[in-house]
Amino acid sequence: MIEKPGRVDENKISIYRAFITMGKVIDENELFKKISFSKHGKKYSVFISKSRATKATHIECRPDNTIYWVQFYPFGAGRWPSRVEKVLIKPINHKDETTLIVIKGKPGIITGLDEGIFVSSRGIPKSNNSVYVMSEGDFKLFEIQ
């Protein structure tokens, strides 16, 4: 059976493909874009960073339930390396939806995952308020266990 163009069978597509085909932008600011969609009756909110991470970027998921963007510059003021950090997002998760934070590019490291509310793309959530944090590449392969 051949599907008609524009028609999507939710049972046959990945979360990433559902995001691409059914996602709707519901919020946007200078740091991220929020996109919502549903798959199998489950709601998803995806926050995509607007900045692209590099190997010098560290994403820190801290116990205060805030995600920080930490950028290292090898030659900062004078001869010393510098570290600049800013709050990327403090996600508010609702019990009836899954929250995904997707970092564009390839961050050097994402720390604080699988502790507290933050879960890695391959992690197991501890509660309904868990928040998945991952790179753009991991998001393309992401499926809930």
Image: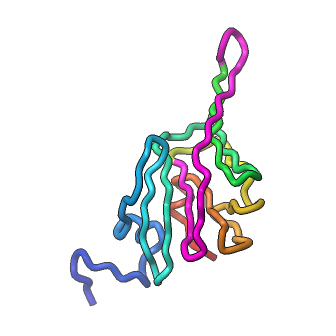
Residue in view at x 24 percent, y 75 percent? 6
87 shown above or below 138: above
Residue 132 picture location, percent across and down: 62, 62
Asked if residue 25 lies in the magenta stretch, the reply is no
Provide residue 72's location: percent of width, then percent of height: 66, 29
Quadrant location, the C terminus = bottom right
Residue at image position (60%, 74%) is 95
- Please say whether residue 76 is one of the residues in the magenta stretch: yes
| Residue, far left | 4
Residue name at image x 45 percent, y 57 percent: 34
Percent coordinates x, y for residue 105 in the rendering? 52, 44
Rendered image quadrant of residue 19: bottom left
**Dividing the picture into quarters, in which one does residue 20 lie?**
bottom left
Going by the image, does 126 lie left or right of 86?
A: right
Stretch in magenta: 75-103
Q: Is residue 133 left or right of residue 141?
A: right
Q: Nearer the viewer, residue 93 or 116?
A: 93
Q: Position of residue 53 (x, y in %)?
A: 55, 40
- Relative height, residue 106 to residue 145 (above, below): above
Q: Quadrant of the N terminus?
A: bottom left
User: Is 29 positioned to the left or the right of 82 in the image?
Assistant: left
